[in-house]
C-alpha cells in the first residue's frame, strides 16, 4: 500500500496519535458538500451529509462510510479511538450517548487526519 507523504504536524496526529488544538482545524467549520478522505491513504471516510456542528472544536460526524473506520479501546481505558480501517491512521475518538443527533454518536476527528474533496471533484486513487 502506497501512503501519502505527511507533514510533521500530520505525522504527529496520524502516526503519533496526537491532537490538534480545538477550533484550529481547517474542517471544523466546513459544511460544503463532499467527501472526507484519509490524509495518509486516500480511503473515503465520511460524507458531508453526516457532519454536524458539535461546538467541540473538531469536525464531528455521526456516521462513517460503511467499513471505513475501526474502533479500538484507547489505552486510557475510557475513550474509544477511531482509525482508518485501511491504513490504521489515527483519526480521533468516538463518543456514544451524547444526544447531539438521532444517531446518538459523535466521531470527533482531527482535520489533520483528513482531506476534503468537494462534491463533483474526482476522489484521488487509493495508494
Image (cartoon, rainbow, N blue to C red):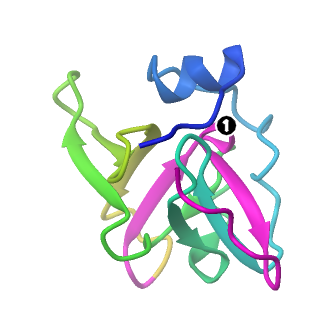
Q: Is residue 98 magenta?
A: no
Query: Looking at this view, is 87 or 46 the one in front?
Result: 87
Residue 70 placed where, x, y %? Answer: 27, 53
Determine whether 24 is above or below 67 in the image: above
Query: Looking at this view, is 67 or 22 the one in front?
Result: 67
Residue neighbourhood size for the residue with mark 1, other residues' Cα within 10 Å, grouped as few (<14), some (14–19), many (≥20): many
Number of labels in the image equals 1
Query: Looking at this view, is 115 or 73 the one in front?
Result: 115
Image-based side of 101 in relation to 80, left or right: right
Image-based side of 113 in relation to 120, left or right: left
Dot 1: element: helix
Residue 8 placed where, x, y %? Answer: 68, 14
Image-based side of 35 in relation to 86, left or right: right
* Residue at left offset 50%, top offset 59%: 43
Residue 58 placed where, x, y %? Answer: 65, 46
Quarter of the view holding residue 117:
bottom right
Q: Is residue 108 magenta?
A: yes
Query: Looking at this view, is 92 or 4 the one in front?
Result: 4
Q: Which residue is mark 1?
A: 112
* Residue at left offset 61%, top offset 37%: 4
Residue 111 placed where, x, y %? Answer: 68, 43
Which quadrant holds the N terminus?
Answer: top left
Segment tinted magenta in the rendering? 102-127
Determine whether 75 is above or below 93 in the image: above
* Residue at left offset 79%, top offset 82%: 119
* Residue at left offset 68%, top offset 63%: 124
Amino acid at each position: 500500500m502506497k501512503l501519502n507523504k505527511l507533514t510533521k504536524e500530520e505525522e504527529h496526529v496520524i502516526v503519533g496519535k496526537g491532537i490538534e488544538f480545538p477550533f484550529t482545524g481547517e474542517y471544523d467549520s466546513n459544511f460544503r458538500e463532499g467527501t472526507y478522505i484519509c490524509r495518509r491513504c486516500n480511503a473515503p471516510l465520511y460524507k458531508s451529509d453526516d457532519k454536524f456542528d458539535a461546538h467541540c472544536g473538531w469536525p464531528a460526524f455521526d456516521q462513517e462510510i460503511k467499513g471505513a473506520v475501526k474502533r479500538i479501546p484507547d489505552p486510557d481505558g475510557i475513550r474509544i479511538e477511531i482509525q482508518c480501517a485501511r491504513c490504521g491512521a489515527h483519526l480521533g475518538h468516538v463518543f456514544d450517548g451524547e444526544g447531539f443527533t438521532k444517531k446518538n454518536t459523535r466521531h470527533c476527528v482531527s482535520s489533520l487526519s483528513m482531506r476534503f474533496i468537494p462534491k463533483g471533484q474526482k476522489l484521488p486513487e487509493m495508494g
